Image (cartoon, rainbow, N blue to C red):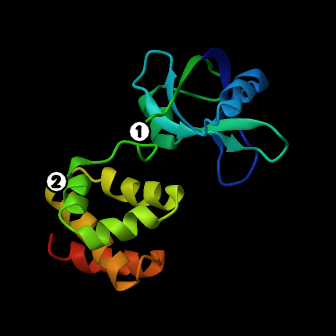
Amino acid sequence: MKFKAIVSKFKDGLWAFHIKIPDKVYKKMSKEGVKRIICQIDEYEPFHAGFMPEGNGKYFIMLSKAKLKAYDLFLGKDVNVKLEVDKTKYGMKMPEEFEEVLSSDSEGEKYFEELTDGKKRSLIHMVATIKSQDIKISKALTILDHLKANEGKVDYKLLNEAFKLSNRKY
């Protein structure tokens, strides 16, 4: 689905910059059960996203500071938006390193697959944002060790402590 939009900004709250989804676009895609999408703005690289609720029956796509900079976006800019259904398993690209670590640890993989989709994406994001292949592998191993030690539960405070310990090696 294609539409024109304007880069907007909420006055306050967790998400600031965003693109509002026209009602007809949201209704058509959500009627088909779509929650995760691949979004392309103008001719820039498509990215994985989700429909975020405003709380008033309207929906938007969040734009990170990194996206604003990389895509030369600013408040009030008119953009062309193209949305496709995200058919990936996790609703985002899985780093090869994380995939390899998962496939080599059946217990860790079991716990990971039992997590909610949102928790899976947050853990994948933690690995995907790292540039170094060695650190990606280390972070993925730390995540699985954490899941196994906590019987499939994610305690982000403890996980961050484990990352800090692991980072001391690098």
Q: Which residue reaches farthest bottom? A: 149
Residue type at numbered disc 2: Gln
Q: Tell which of 73 and 166 is nearer to you.
A: 166
Which residue in the structure is indicated by mark 1? Answer: 88
Q: Amino acid at mark 1?
A: Thr
Specify the quadrant that holds the C terminus: bottom left
Residue 52 position within the rendered picture, expressed as x and y whole percent measured from the top left: 66, 43
Q: Is residue 116 left or right of residue 108?
A: right
Question: Please, is residue 31 above or below residue 132 in the view?
Answer: above
Q: Is residue 61 left or right of residue 55?
A: left
Q: Secondary structure at mark 1?
A: loop
What is the quadrant of the N terminus in the image? Answer: top right
On the image, the x and y values in percent for residue 114 come to 45, 66
What is the crowding at mark 1: few (fewer than 14 residues within 10 Å), some, or many (at least 20)? few
Residue at image x 76%, y 44%? 54
Q: How far apart are the two marked residues, 1 and 2, measured between alpha carbons?
A: 22 Å
Is residue 157 placed above or below 63 in the rendered structure? below
Residue at image x 14%, y 75%? 169
Tell me the SS state at disc 2: helix
Residue 166 at x, y = what percent?
Answer: 23, 76
Mark 2 lies on residue: 133
Q: Residue at x 35, y 68 (%)?
A: 110
The reply, left or right, for residue 71 in relation to residue 130 is: right
Q: Residues within 10 Å of mark 2 (few under 14, many from 20)?
A: some
* Residue 4 x/y as whole percent: 65, 15
Choose the circle earlier in sequence order: 1 or 2: 1
Residue at image point 34% right, 85% down: 149
